[in-house]
Image: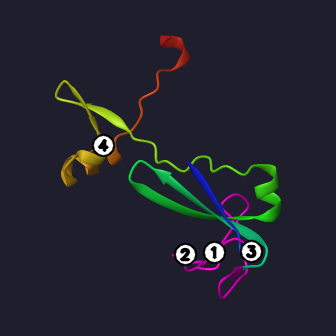
Amino acid sequence: MVFVKTAKKNKKLKTNSSNPYCYDCKKEIEVKGKQIKNGVLLAYKDDMEKIKVFKCNSCFKKNPSLTNFRKCEVYSRVVGYLRPVQQWNIGKFKEFKERKEYKLSKEYL
């Protein structure tokens, strides 16, 4: 579900972002008090989480939706079970980061 808020429509604009930049092009968005000068504030609901994102006017005209905002969940096999890496303890997570990918040379393929 998408809710679009602009300076004209939203008189009670509250931004939780200390440095408002366009989500797509990283252009700085000018916020003067309760007005957005050169962009829009997009508010999304993702399950129980509320996401607020700024977009400049040109990026909003190109694509008014928010894409690529979810973090990729990585799974790996531990003792026969597939588990999300985020749920591992500190030691196992550190060991996972130190792993190196082994590539066979073309002569073995």
Q: Earlier in the sequence, mark 3 or mark 4?
A: 3
Spatial separation of the CA atoms under disc 3 and disc 2: 19 Å
Residue 80 position in % (x across, y down): 19, 24
* Total numbered labels placed on residues in the image: 4
- Residue sticking out furthest to the left: 79
Spatial separation of the CA atoms under disc 3 and disc 4: 44 Å
What amino acid does circle 4 point to? Answer: Val
Which of label 3 and label 2 is nearer to you?
Answer: 3
What amino acid does circle 2 point to? Answer: Ser
Spatial separation of the CA atoms under disc 2 and disc 1: 6 Å
Residue 56 position by quadrant: bottom right
Mark 3 burial class by Cα count in 10 Å: few <14, some 14-19, many 20+: few
Q: Residue at x 55, y 16 (%)?
A: 106
Residue located beneath label 3 in the image: 8
Which of label 4 and label 1 is nearer to you?
Answer: 1
Residue located beneath label 4 in the image: 85
Residue located beneath label 2 in the image: 17
CB under 8 Å between callouts 2 and 4?
Answer: no
Mark 4 burial class by Cα count in 10 Å: few <14, some 14-19, many 20+: some
Q: Is residue 60 above or below residue 17?
A: above
What mark, if any, has residue 20 been given in the picture?
1
